[in-house]
Amino acid sequence: MKKPRKPKVAPTMPPPERRLVLCVVGAPHGVRGECRVKSFTADPLAITDYGTLFAADGRAFEIEQGRWLKDDMLVVRFEGMTDRDEVAKLTNTELFVDRDNLPETEEEDEFYHADLIGLEAVDDAGTLIGRVDSMQNFGAGDIVEIRPVGGGQTWLLPFTKEAALKVDLKGGKLLIDPAHLAKPEPHQERPGYERPPAKSGKNKPGSGHKKPISEDKP
């Protein structure tokens, strides 16, 4: 006699303090319900390792299939979604995971990249400079990409002890030294200009560097 199947337990949306953004949905890819997804993990495909993904409105998503496209971009099919128009409605939707599904960092000055995204960048006087838009790595260490409070092209800041002075995750702030900000040249402030994409990854320990880590840690 077969044992009765246990009912599938619906995933529970984590409270705000445990929500960690892992990716953002892009445009549809093809006509079979696939879409592009920008991953915030060092190994882009690692977003499949941490369980159910949630949108801010409470919807839950399971990744049925995923494959690497380029840089930090994936092509993903979500479970139960096969229609291009349905997937198109998700464009620009951030998806987060329960922070408890990720292992704790081993050192006090280690952070998940996704923990830093969204932090307010402030100077030592408390003036709001902007918000952390993403973490990048061009091969010489981790770079904080900051969206200025007044809008416009993003600014870059090396994630070093000299430039990123203090990370306050509970307060939602990143204390920075604005002198280390790299701002675009005036001629680059033109419509359609985009900085070339770059892969993000683990920062190798080095002199003077903090060590943000990404979500591919086993």
Image (tube, rainbow, N blue to C red):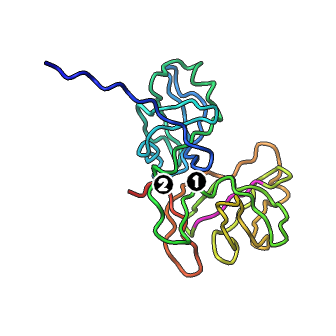
Quadrant where the C terminus is found in the figure = bottom left
- Between residues 8 and 28, which one lies in front from this camera angle? 8
Q: Give the residue displayed 47% in from the left and 29% down from the top.
A: 78
Give the quarter of the image for residue 37. top right
Q: Which residue is mark 2?
A: 215
Q: Which residue is mark 1?
A: 114
Q: Please check the rendered image and state whether residue 144 is part of the magenta-colored stretch, yes or no.
A: yes
Q: Give the residue displayed 46% in from the left and 53% down from the top.
A: 102
Give the quarter of the image for residue 143. bottom right
Q: As displayed, is residue 208 above or below residue 107?
A: below
> What SS does tag 2 mark?
loop
> What SS does tag 1 mark?
helix
Disc 1 marks a residue whose amino acid type is Ala
Disc 2 marks a residue whose amino acid type is Glu
Q: Give the magenta part as a residue range.
A: 142-147
Q: As displayed, is residue 137 above or below residue 32?
A: below
Q: Please state if 187 lies on the left or on the right of 206 as rendered.
A: right
Q: Please check the rendered image and state whether residue 211 is part of the magenta-colored stretch, yes or no.
A: no
Give coordinates of residue 162: x percent, y percent.
69, 78
Q: In the displayed image of the protein, which residue is found farthest to the bottom?
A: 207
Q: Give the residue displayed 54% in from the left and 72% down from the top.
A: 108
Give coordinates of residue 193: x percent, y percent.
75, 47
* 2 and 1 marks in contact (CB < 8 Å): yes
Q: Main secondary structure of the magenta part?
A: strand
Among numbered discs 2 and 1, the one appearing first in the sequence? 1
Q: In the displayed image of the protein, which residue is found farthest to the left?
A: 1
Mark seen at residue 200: none
Q: As displayed, is residue 171 above or below residue 10?
A: below
Q: Give the residue displayed 68% in from the left and 71% down from the top.
A: 166
